Amino acid sequence: MRGFRQAARRVARGEMSFLDHLDALRGVLVASAIAVLGTSVVYWFYSGRILDWLVAAVPVDYLIFSAPSEALMVRTRLSFTLGGLTSFPYVAYRVWRFVTPGLFANESRRIMSVVVASSVLFYVGTAFCYFFVAPAVVNFMLGYATEHVRPMITVGAYFDTVLRMCFAFGLVFQLPVAMLLISLTGLVTPGLFLRQWRWAIVIIFIASAIFTPPDPVSQVLMATPLCVLYIGSALVSLVVVRRRERESEAS
C-alpha cells in the first residue's frame, strides 16, 4: 500500500513513465482479482444456503434444473457474483486511486466519499432490482400462462436473467456519481443538466428499454427511479459546484 501511495503521488506530479503506469495498473488488477477470488471462495461454502434463501423470493413454488451440472454452475456463478459485490468497494477504491491522481488531483482527498457513494448506489440498485423489480417482472411474464401452458423455470435461466438485470440496475444507479464528477470537471454544468431534463428522460427510457427484458414493467421500474436520481443529482451537483466556486473565490 505504501508503494502504491508513492506511485499515486508520482502520477500526480507527472513523474511516472509509461511502464510505471502499466506496473501500477497491474498492481490494481492483481489486487482486485485476489479480493474477488478470495471472497468468492468463502461464499462457495455457503452457496447452497444462500441459493435457498434467494429462491424463497422467487414468485414461483420452486425452480428446477434440467442438466446434471446446472445447479453446480449456478452456485459457482452465484459465489463469484456475491464475491464481486462484496469486493466492489475495495475494487472501486483501488481503481479510483489509480485514476484520480492524474484527472482530479485537487479532489483526491475526497476519493473515499466517491467510493462510498458509488458502492452504496450499486448495492441499492441491485437490491431494488432483485427484491422489487425481478418479482414484478416474473409475475408479469407468468401471467401469459394458459390452462395447458404451465411454467417450469430452470434455476439457470432464472438467475441468468435476474443477475443481468441486477448488474444493469447497479450500473445505471451510478448516474449520480457520474453526473457529480462531470460537473466538477466543468465538462457539463449542473444548469445544463437541469435545462435538458426532457431529453434526459427520453434517453433514460431508451436506455431502460435496452438494459431490461422486453416488457413494459421492468422498463418503467428502471426508468422511474433513474428520472428521480437524475433530477436529484443535478440539484446536488448545482449545490456542490456553487459551494466549490465560493470557496475558490474566498481563497
Image (spheres, rainbow, N blue to C red):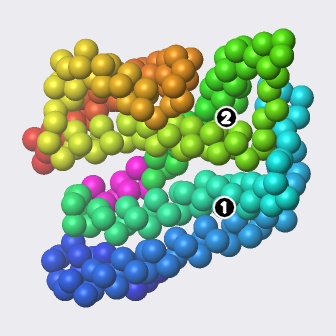
Residue sitting nearer the eye, 54 or 17:
54
**At 22% across and 26% down in the image, what residue appears?**
193
Magenta highlight range:
107-114
Quadrant position of residue 210: top left
Neighbours of disc 1 within 10 Å: few (<14), some (14-19), many (20+): many
Query: Where is residue 165 drawn, in percent x and y?
Result: 57, 38
Query: Image height check: is 121 above or below 22?
Result: above
The amino acid type of the residue labelled 2 equals Tyr
Whether the magenta-drawn stretch holds residue 171 is answered as: no
Residue sitting nearer the eye, 162 or 109:
162
Please give the residue where the numbered disc 1 appears in the rendered image. Answer: 80
Residue sitting nearer the eye, 67 or 232:
67
Tell which residue pokes out farthest to the front in this image. Answer: 148
Query: Where is residue 54 drawn, in percent x and y?
Result: 80, 41
244 sits to left or right of 23: left
Quadrant position of residue 202: top left
Magenta: main secondary structure equals: helix
The amino acid type of the residue labelled 1 equals Phe
Whether the magenta-drawn stretch holds residue 108 is answered as: yes
Neighbours of disc 2 within 10 Å: few (<14), some (14-19), many (20+): some
Please give the residue where the numbered disc 2 appears in the rendered image. Answer: 130
Query: Where is residue 249 drawn, in percent x and y?
Result: 10, 41
189 sits to left or right of 92: left
